[in-house]
Image (cartoon, rainbow, N blue to C red):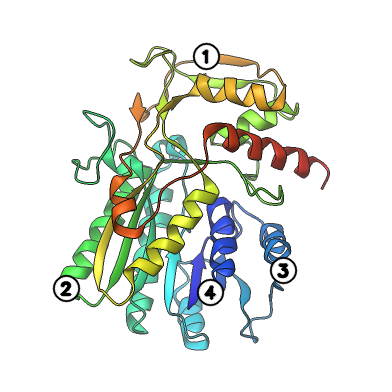
Amino acid sequence: MKILVTGGAGYIGSHTCVELLEAEHQVLVLDNLSNSNLGNLEKVSQIVNIELNVDEEKDCDFSFIKGDIRDKKLLIKIFSSYAIDGVIHFAGLKAVGESVEKPIKYYNNNVVGSVILVEVMNKFDCKTFVFSSSATVYGEPHTVPIKENFPLSASNPYGQSKLIVENFLRELFVSDDGWHVALLRYFNPIGAHESGLIGDNPNGIPNNLMPYISQVAVGKLKELSIFGDDYDTHDGTGVRDYIHVVDLAKGHVKALSAMGDSPQVLVLNLGTGAGYSVLDLVKNFEQVSNKKIPYRVQSRRSGDIAECYADPTLAKDKIGWEAEKNLEEMCFDTWNFQLNSQTD
């Protein structure tokens, strides 16, 4: 299949490109490089030993186009020029704290961009769509682990933007049941490719926990800020379901395959089913890196919740997927990537 991967130069997108190419799909990446870089795709090219094409006039197994999903003219040009069989949609903004401060920016990027993308897909009768959603659509769950049929009520603009797009895609299917839609609710992706070539390396100061920890470990950042140590958890810090990014990437390929010829809306949690606290993560990282991680406790962030971890049973039942890597492997691969990136 020829798959358009929006946001494919980013953290999760680049790892998914690896898995798609290794599964012998053709991949076309569209990314505006606002929080990623082309070097990620060049390293994907090294991993899979397939040349990256940046010439829009050529149709190759692995290609890149710089652009924004809100650019409707560009999308029409892409779908006119390439026989796209399906879309995996990562492009969007993802920082919970920033979304509280800048909701307009998040709704414009995440919601408007998704609607424009789907509109163009519909115009070209491309109706296979894998959506990068989030566990934030559950808001503050009354119990854990979280099942897909739990009530949905996002507690911040980032989560709301994901929930709005989910609802839009459901309504789209009601209006036209020829669509193949997967709504993949991620928990907390961490880790890196075992090669050490690609990982979570955001522009500027990281918004996510694991890259922040790894940058503290190598001295790029002074200390880790832990937002809240008074949650109702085993050590007072927030508990999350951390999933290895390679496991997560494999989930997309499985979902793409499982939808097959059956139009549907497939809603799945992608997580491990285990909850670890911020301090659990810090301690595991210290063990694999043999580095002390200094930290300072600060007040809670707006929009954060105490506990969030998945019941991943449905993903195993529906698409034959389950996470395989443990927390130690996630920390080790992150540290390996950090050390490798220091020498680039």
Residue occupied by mark 1: 297
Question: CA separation, marks 3 and 1?
Answer: 44 Å
Q: Earlier in the sequence, mark 1 or mark 2?
A: 2
State the image coordinates of residue 23 (x, y, percent, origin top left): 54, 69
Residue occupied by mark 3: 49
CB of mark 1 within 8 Å of CB of mark 4? Answer: no
Nearer mark to the viewer, of 4 and 2: 4
Residue occupied by mark 4: 25
Q: Amino acid at mark 3?
A: Asn
Question: CA separation, marks 1 and 4?
Answer: 45 Å
Q: Earlier in the sequence, mark 4 or mark 2?
A: 4
SS under mark 4: loop
SS under mark 1: strand
State the image coordinates of residue 244 (x, y, percent, origin top left): 52, 43
Q: Amino acid at mark 2?
A: Ser
SS under mark 2: helix
Which residue corresponds to the image point at 66% horizontal and 48% vertical from the top-left?
194
Closer-to-camera residue (344/298)? 344
* Mark carried by residue 175: 2
Q: Is residue 118 left or right of residue 336?
A: left
Which residue corresponds to the image point at 50% horizontal and 67% vertical from the top-left?
5
Q: Is residue 290 left or right of residue 343?
A: left
Q: Amino acid at mark 4?
A: His
Question: CA separation, marks 3 and 4?
Answer: 14 Å
